[in-house]
Amino acid sequence: MTRTSSLFHVAAKRRAVLDSFARSNLGRGGFVFCHMAVKLNHTLVDSRDRDASALFLSELLGIDPPLVLGPFALVKVGDELTLDFRHVEREIKPQHYAFLVSEREFDEIFARIEKRQLDFWADPHKSRPHEINHWDDGRGVYFEDPNGHLLEVITRSYGSAGVQTKNPHPLVAEKLERKDQAADGSTKAAPH
Ligand SMILES: [Fe+2]
């Protein structure tokens, strides 16, 4: 067998193996060739005054006005995701909604919070009023909508800066500390 035919033989054999794998169950439905693009499309938001609540959010975030669709007022908060406000008479159980924004958008949103003289906090427990946080070396703030839903605006995703940063997210730091706790109670250096 010449060198050229030998290389051709190896390439053909490799292609046959890949074809066989692609036809297999693992290749069709397994984790190697399967790329699922599931996106949250919409979720309902209970409110006492549907239109006022939807307008409050769109105005605070500085995004498009709500779109009324049947009993819902849709606020588009992503490429496709909508928060669908609906009116309910029963007691509203407060939920939490967090929005990732740019630094410039944060400035604009925070200016609206101050202009409306809304209460705001640096933490979800509302123990740090009139403050913002700097978790993950970004900025974050909590405030409430007219229904008591806890809204949050952040410029960095939770934990995105890791633990070796000036202001790690407290939840990330807490979780890693527990993992690093040795059986004898001593602590190890956090992994890089
Ligand atoms: Fe949050």
Image: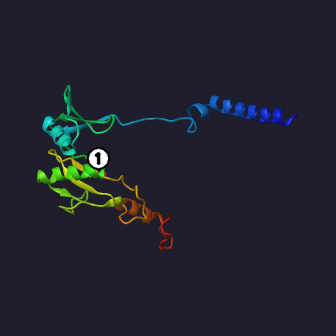
Image label count: 1
Going by the image, does 108 lie left or right of 10?
left
Q: Position of residue 144 (x, y in %)?
A: 18, 50
Q: Residue at x 42, y 63 (%)?
A: 163
Give the residue drawn at x 61%, y 33%: 27
Q: How is the image coloured?
A: rainbow
Kindly identify the residue that appears in the image at 66 percent across and 33 percent down.
21
Characterize the local packing of mark 1: few (<14), some (14-19) or many (20 or more) Cα atoms within 10 angstroms. Answer: some
Residue at point 24% right, 46% down? 95
Quarter in which the N terminus is drawn: top right
Question: Element type at marker 1?
Answer: strand
Whole-percent x and y of residue 108?
Answer: 21, 50
Q: Is residue 107 left or right of residue 187?
A: left
Residue 59 versus residue 179 in the image, above or below? above
Q: Which residue is mark 1?
A: 99
Residue 129 location, quadrant: bottom left
Residue at the right extreme?
Answer: 1
Quarter holding residue 41: top left
Q: Amino acid at mark 1?
A: Phe
* Front residue (pair 108, 49): 108
Residue 96 x, y percent position in the rendering? 26, 48
Viewer-proximal residue, 80 or 180? 80
Q: Residue furthest top?
A: 70
Q: Is residue 30 left or right of residue 64?
A: right
